Image (cartoon, helix red, strand yellow):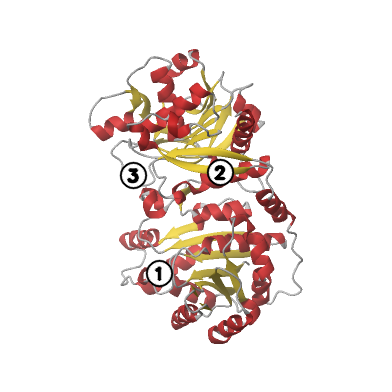
Amino acid sequence: MARYIFITGGVVSSLGKGLASAALGALLQARGYTVRLRKLDPYLNVDPGTMSPFEHGEVFVTDDGAETDLDLGHYERFTGVSARKTDSVSSGRVYSTVLEKERRGDYLGKTIQVIPHVTNEIKEFIDIGDDEVDFMLCEIGGTVGDIEGLPFFEAIRQFSQDKPRGQCIFMHLTLLPYIAASGELKTKPTQHSVKELRSIGIAPDVLVCRSEGPIPKKEREKLALFCNVRPDSVIAAQDLKSIYEAPLAYHREGMDQAVLDAFGIAPAPRPDLRRWEDVYDRTYNPEGEVKVAIVGKYTQLEDAYKSIKEALTHGGMANRVKVNVEWVDAEIFDTEEAAPYLQGFHAILVPGGFGERGTEGKIKAAQFARERNIPYLGICLGMQMAVIEAARNVANLANAGSEEFDHEAGGKRFTPVVYHLKEWVQGNHVVERKVGDDKGGTMRLGSYTAKLSEGSKVAEIYGSTTIEERHRHRYEVDTAYRAKLEDCGLSFSGMSPDGKLPEIVEWRDHPWFIGVQFHPELKSKPFEPHPLFKDFIRAAKETSRLV
């Protein structure tokens, strides 16, 4: 039976609950325990899949095809445990399930209420896989006091009472603001946050306080006294230069020991932190630098490309270089030439996205990289734009474009080199989709197999001709143009097992130009960089030596 750690937040959002949860999971692993991390989000969307990145940042995709919160990316990157559909739930999904059961008559005519029906559904979700791991870490989205989060707080309160005594603990993350005018670190916001939490029946066992610097002994004792926790259970969450310092920083503060003490686990196993000491060394002791341009349309919000930026960092760790990422708005190239903006970069990455906005700029970025022999990695839409660029400028298909853009414009402006995916094989059955289907969950989602060509660059990079990667897209490159494009030098070096869907393209005569239909960034970790990002940064490092 798993022990449960519920992580809640107060005062303000974006304090780093997800990072704290992930770091704690890594520390428990370092002590020899098995862990699984979950996210409970109060928003009414069924999942983040249809949210704009400006609203909610990146959508993280699991192997089994769930569209989830970006915090699950932190969980995977820090623990290496692959997330599942059962590791993410929103109010929208909970209420949808409850209403489906009511329509079927599962409640036998009873009046449906938040308590017990909604809270019971949340508790059932939390309890999935109870016998699989030593510790289950459950992060509650939002902050205590949010009206939409109340059913979740009530559910975890009930859950802790349902389980045997000592089976659940609560960790609360708050803010300790520093008032420069008076030179004081203020504990009152934390006191009020804990008071709010206690008013709904939950008392924190561990208090994690976000601050710019260390918490003085006087303030630590004051927090312990007024929040009813032990002084050694008041943990400082100081600002860090790199998120990958978090496990070591939290260990120095005693977070993992405080959690084990709260469970009464003694003596606690000694932690093996060599993995994170190596990550720390590679992060803070690089032997060079490279500049990488990310040409996208959500560049005003870095969280929209969170996993990509982290995967580039991992590639830098593997090559002992610091990766300096610069965000370039693809829409600039709609009216201006790419060269003045992209000169001086050692590599160019074009990420995924939806819709036509910014696509002409992405096409120009692919052209610039191809013609200048600069390493290029195109991900999802970035691969499609590279294929369209090749079709227009090398294969002489002047009107090459995507069916996606024609649908948006309501006309036939393009020769659709990229088309809407109408059916594909998933497991043992065929999945069918129509253009007018609901947007939520109608893409090719999750892990799919790809077969790589013998002797191709990608087969060399992966060290295999069979790979598994995660997808999230509605459109595919049309194989009708494959022969014409391959005659021009663009190799279709990765295909679906049935040979119908292109997965990877690469220019045969280019030092490093690869486009992939999937999202390799979702599987990269600091202690296990993804092969594509590792080699992409290696190529950028080689380019930097030639400049």
Name the one closer to the observer, 2 or 335: 335
Mark on residue 346? none
- Please state which amino acid type lies under the numbered disc 2: Asn
**Quadrant of the snapshot with the N terminus:** bottom right
> In this rendering, does residue 395 appear at all?
yes
Point out the tag, 1 or 2, that comes first from the N-terminus.
Answer: 1
Name the one closer to the observer, 123 or 446: 446
| Residue 508 on image: x %, y % | 56, 19
**Quadrant of the snapshot with the C terminus:** top right
Q: Which residue is mark 3?
A: 439
Mark on residue 324? 2
Mark 3 burial class by Cα count in 10 Å: few <14, some 14-19, many 20+: few
Name the one closer to the observer, 131 or 516: 516
As drawn, 375 above or below 262: above
Q: Residue at x 43, y 66 (%)?
A: 142
Point out the tag, 3 or 1, that comes first from the N-terminus.
Answer: 1
